[in-house]
Image (cartoon, grey):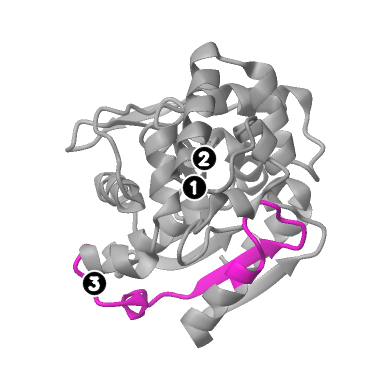
Amino acid sequence: MFFYPYQYITLENDENIAYIQDLSLDKPNLLFLHGNLSSASNWTRTLQALAGDYNLYALDLRGFGQSSYHHKISHLSDFAQDVKRFIQTMNLNDLTIIGWSAGGGVALEVAALLPDTIKQVILVASIGLRGFEDIIDVFPNVLPLFNPFGQASSEFAHQSIVSHMESNFRLRNRFFFQRLLHAGIFQRSHLDPTYENRLTMDAMRQQNFGDFYYSLLYFNLEEELQQMGYSSLSTIKCPVHIWHGVYDRVVESKEAYAFKAAFGKQAHLKIFKQSGHAIMDDEFELFIESIRAIV
């Protein structure tokens, strides 16, 4: 298995954003956004499968992977502004944006910011309209890894989780991150060892865990759109495809149905019956077929 070499672009806010690409002239443009504890590398297999038929881009969001973290984030909209700058600097248009997990929330905000550029949004196991209202209740099977002391859901518990995680980042505890990724994300995946090692190493490079954790905890899509100057979800005009795995332990499937209800006829819901949170790895062939069917 090979990995794409990173390219780098400096945005007007001085953040140095790392990205990978696989380009084919006069083909549709696709941009892939990752989630927490991940990077552009999580899209490697997808890009290789689609290569030749699309212009493909995947970036490391600010504070992830190889990208810089000069300015702290407080909301997912900070990432959306970065992605907007990336799209404009790269002069991308008629763009399909694919967001996995927290990247789904970012993708929707980008669609609001660039309504004439974003052709459609694909939400892959996306966080819900209100993010993780109680992240401790969302995936209790992972809680002992996040929070070994077992406190109840409270501000103290959240502080404990962040502190414990940041300690493992400082220690570069590879074994801990392997267990965490398997428990929460890849519980149904059978990853190539080289690929798994790359994803683990990239997860350990995350610089923004505490800031990102709280941005997910207090995320509210409609409120963030209003803060950006937009009135409601109706600002997002493009088709929204909602893909969710039956066995997702990170984001409950009820969030996918809530998105469908919120977007109505412009939304298209697809349930992956053998997938957990990492649909692109759990049902790889079906995932690729599903992209080709709509782009």
> Of the residues shown, which amino acid type is indicated by label 2?
Ala
Under mark 1, the amino acid is Ser
Q: Earlier in the sequence, mark 1 or mark 3?
A: 1
Is 259 covered by the magenta stretch? no
Badge 3 element? loop
Q: Is residue 177 left or right of residue 85?
A: right
Residue depicted at 47% across the width and 27% down the height:
163
Label number found at residue 230: 3
Which residue: 51% across, 19% down?
A: 167
- CB atoms of marks 1 and 2 within 8 Å: yes
Relative to the observer, which residue lies in front, 73 or 51?
Answer: 73
Q: Quadrant of the N terminus?
A: top right
Amino acid identity at mark 3: Tyr
Q: Where does label 2 land, which residue?
A: 157
Q: Is residue 254 magenta?
A: yes
Magenta range: 228-256
Vertical placement of residue 11 versus 175, above or below: below
Q: Position of residue 183 (x, y in %)?
A: 73, 38
